[in-house]
Amino acid sequence: MRPTAQAKLGPVPAFKDLLETRQVAIYFGAVLFGAALACGLRGTAAWQPAIAPALALMLFLTFLQLPLASLGQALRARRFLATLLGVNFVAVPLLVALLLPLLPADPLLRLGVLLVLLCPCIDYVVTFAQMGRADARLLLAATPWLLLLQMALLPLFLALLLGEAAAGLVRPGPFVQAFVWLIAAPLALALACQRWAGARVNAALALLPVPATALVLLLVVASVLPQLGQAGPAAWRAVPVCGLFALLAPLLGWWLARRARLPVPAARAVAFSAGTRNSLVVLPLALAVPGALPLLPAVVVAQTLVELVAELVYIRWMPRLGRLGEPA
């Protein structure tokens, strides 16, 4: 997660803020550079084995920024937490179920879309929420709950929405192995660093999530693009559905949050969370699916690009929501 520093004391926090505020441009630049490398060099498909360690590093740095040792903080804002979890794990899955028939009947393509749209973001959503005048503090405190619940509920959602196809695609062995080594292990290491590493070490590592995420995007694009072939048009079929989700999900989150009588900044935070997904965090699970390459990584990257464009709209549009009811 890349939360903005509370106070700008010296060059390190200032550089961290610069990375966070420019992260959309950095990510698009990484994607373009990866595509240029794939077009200009031979053999970039052989970089695929580097994706897993890069993902593990990115997830460790992401988890390191989460308040993992203070899960109880979010429980103090019970109405906000109940609304946030209800939107992400009840309302959003229902919305995804309604959008699913718009996709072709290809089970692998549908699995890729479900993996990204069913999992709420736990990292850059906090930065974008703060930029969009949402209550980023409440959202930050709730991110560990979002992570734990999505990992627990994702197999259930996939079974409900894919039916028998889920059993053939999501095999327990590779799925569990990817979860243990690329999610659980970095999570445990991040918790250990939070408890026992010094403040200077953690502050230095806090500069790295954005570059690490850019590295993952570069490697995925550079290694997948040469293999895309006939899977390219299929991956592009997911883009309209992801765009429609990016339009409807924050509106749904905002409406339900206001029905729950949350304050305007808290309601904006729910809207940001509803529209922002955990694409790169679930990429290890996508890569564990038999026959995942190249379609599933392409779907993940396509959804990420749609979402980054949507975030630029959100940070300009969200502050207008409930402006009249917002305290000065």
Image (tube, rainbow, N blue to C red):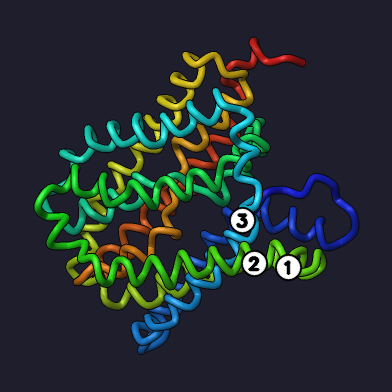
Residue at label 1?
196
Classify mark 1: residues with Cα within 10 Å, few (<14), some (14-19) or many (20+): few
Q: Could you tell me if the residues under marks 1 and 2 are in contact, i.e. CB atoms within 8 Å?
A: yes
Residue at label 2?
192
Q: Amino acid at mark 2?
A: Ala
Q: Residue furthest right?
A: 10
Q: Secondary structure at mark 1?
A: helix
Q: Residue furthest top?
A: 324
Which residue does the image show at 62% across and 18% down from the upper left? 263
Spatial CA distance of label 3 from label 2 is: 27 Å
User: Camera-side residue: 218 or 169?
Assistant: 169
* Vertical order, 216 against 40 (above or below): above
Classify mark 2: residues with Cα within 10 Å, few (<14), some (14-19) or many (20+): some
Q: Secondary structure at mark 2?
A: helix
Q: Amino acid at mark 3?
A: Gln
Q: Which mark is residue 23?
A: 3
Q: Could you tell me if the residues under marks 3 and 2 are in contact, i.e. CB atoms within 8 Å?
A: no
Image location (x, y in percent) of residue 150: 40, 47
